Amino acid sequence: MQTPSSTGADCVIVINCGSSSLKLAVLPAEGETVLLKGLAERLGGPDATLTVEKDGETTVTSIPSASHHEALQATVRSMDGLTPRGIGHRVVHGGEEFTASALIDDGVMEAVERCASLAPLHNPANLTGIRTARSLFPGLPQVAVFDTAFHQTLPPKAFHYAIPHSYYEDLKVRRYGFHGTSHHYVSLEAARMLGKRAEETSLITLHIGNGCSGCAIRDGRSVDTTMGLTPSEGLVMGTRSGDVDPALHQFLQDQTGMRLGEITAMLNSRSGLLGLSGLSNDMRTLSDAARNGHQRAALAIEVFCYRLAKSTAGLMAALERIDAVVFTGGIGENSAEIRAATAAHLAIFGIHLDDAKNSAHANLISSTNSRIPCLVVPTNEELMIARETLRLTS
Ligand code: ADP
């Protein structure tokens, strides 16, 4: 394997490791075009597969029972001719330990492990990715980029829950927020589009994909966000309910005999757009169905847009002025209908979209008489992780 001392290190590897999956992207050290993409799925199982996209070609290989190590090794074999300068890892939870990306050493590994109680499904998998990459590329610098780090600038009034303070002191129960890499990236892009310096730009960024969150950014820093201790809080999402009455758990347990774990699973994986519509968590499917008269698909979309608008209005309380509302994520970037329905609820703030620009997914989609500009900014978390990796390894 090559090391940074090799001449001509010309790319960065970005890894997003899940419990049974591994996503990898290779980006050039200069430029933005992804050179190679790898996706290993169902790792450890008999039907594990590896999909590699390179030079416009996609190959799918069966890798039965392959481990993360074997999957990464197989993907890296396709990198012939490319020499990595560093490896960037998406790490979900950095707790209060990480306010920025970090060059990985044993101390960082231990700290990520300490945060695992806050993200028991994600951080251990992220650590597996780091260990695997370290064993395949010994000596190559590696960087952890945290979903939570961008939100560590939230002031206490935004991050505290109104519960006994001892839960914060003893267990670090507080709002952390997620999608930080995406909110940060689109805020930098939006500042560039607006011709302003990031540290002078105040925005509301709406990351709406399968997972959804909003963020209030004041002078380039996150000052409030809709996700909380976990990614379950806040907006309606593909399969997550977002905010519910905290007494709902007790009510359901009393009425149905469901156990706490079952209720949490229902709120995470059978709720949101899927639960409301009874049809799908996919916005494209729901939009088509609603157009064809599916009433619950229409209801799911209405609830989704209303709650998104309501949270956007709430996030405005964190700002002194606002330069733009920014839509991003699979839905935010691609659905003119959802943007229009959400903006319609925000007319009281003087927000108005230009139908033609909105339908064309232009960067600036608000009308000339809109008091607040609205932008569509495609997110690129891999590029942001690659940039952070280069920044910390150069
Ligand atoms: P993830 O959060 O898993 O990264 P994405 O950001 O890719 O997800 O967003 C997935 C969502 O984006 C799905 O609900 C999908 O239906 C929606 N989406 C993608 N393209 C469109 C489109 N053209 N119109 C409406 N929704 C879309």
Image (cartoon, grey):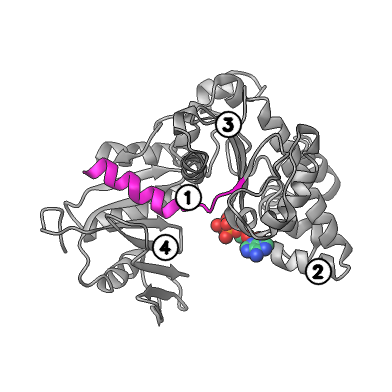
Residue contact at pointers 4 and 2, CB within 8 angstroms: no
- In x, y percent, where is residue 82? 22, 66
Q: What residue is disc 3 on?
A: 175
Residue in the image at 80% along x and 55% along y:
300
Among numbered discs 3 and 4, the one appearing first in the sequence: 4
Q: Secondary structure at mark 1?
A: loop
Q: What residue is disc 4 on?
A: 23
Q: CA distance from mark 3 to mark 1?
A: 17 Å
Decide which of 90, 254 is in the foreground and name it.
90
Q: Nearer the viewer, mark 2 or mark 3?
A: 2
Disc 4 crowd rating (10 Å Cα; few below 14, some 14-19, many 20+) is many
Q: What residue is disc 2 on?
A: 289
Q: Mark 4 is on which residue type?
A: Lys
Q: Is residue 228 visible?
A: no
On screen, residue 372 versus residue 34, left or right, reads right
Q: Mark 2 is on which residue type?
A: Ala
Q: Secondary structure at mark 4?
A: strand
Residue positioned most to the front: 368
* Residue 325 placement: quadrant: top right
Disc 3 crowd rating (10 Å Cα; few below 14, some 14-19, many 20+) is many
Question: Where does the magenta region start and end?
Answer: 375-394
Residue in the image at 55% along x and 23% along y:
168
Q: What residue is disc 1 on?
A: 122
* Residue 311 placement: quadrant: top right
Q: Mark 1 is on which residue type?
A: His
Q: Mark 3 is on which residue type?
A: Arg
Q: Nearer the viewer, mark 1 or mark 4?
A: 4
On screen, residue 186 versus residue 282, left or right, reads left
Q: Is residue 361 visible?
A: yes
- In x, y percent, where is residue 212? 63, 48
